[in-house]
Image (spheres, rainbow, N blue to C red):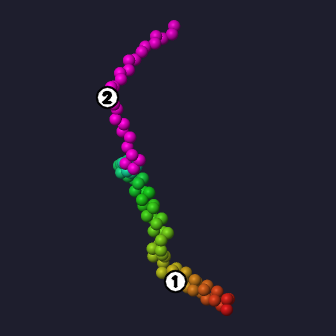
Amino acid sequence: MAPKATRVPVQRVDAPRRSSNKGYVSSAYSALTSPENASVVRSVAVFGAAVAFFSSSWSEFLLPPECYDTIRYDSIRHAEMLQLANA
């Protein structure tokens, strides 16, 4: 025997519903500033700062002095060899 069909009454609300559609910028801001995303946001910020530092000329300060002098000496010697070859 098939089960009886029961109907569930649905009440309609006459008052208009307010949609909670937030703008893209405000929803992105609230997502970035939420405490559950703080570690991810911090990690991305540190990674971006590290990439910016290593791609700048400030990263040369991390080289040891003798290595920097060797690189500079090699580039000067290479320039001298090029001038002798072109002369």
**Chief secondary structure of the magenta portion:** loop
Query: Which residue does the numbered mark 2 point to in the structure image?
Result: 15
Disc 2 crowd, CA 10 A, few/some/many (<14, 14-19, 20+): few
Highlighted range, magenta:
1-26
Residue at left offset 43%, top offset 13%:
6
The front one of 28 and 45 is: 28
Task: Identify the residue under disc 1.
Answer: 69
Q: Is residue 73 left or right of residue 62?
A: right
State the quadrant of the C terminus. Answer: bottom right
Numbered badge on residue 61 = none
What x and y, as percent, mark residue 8? 40, 17
Sequence order check, earlier mark of 2 and 1: 2
Q: Is residue 21 visible?
A: yes
Name the amino acid type tagged 1.
Asp
Mark 2 vs mark 1: in front: 2
At x 47% / y 71%, what residue is drawn?
Answer: 56
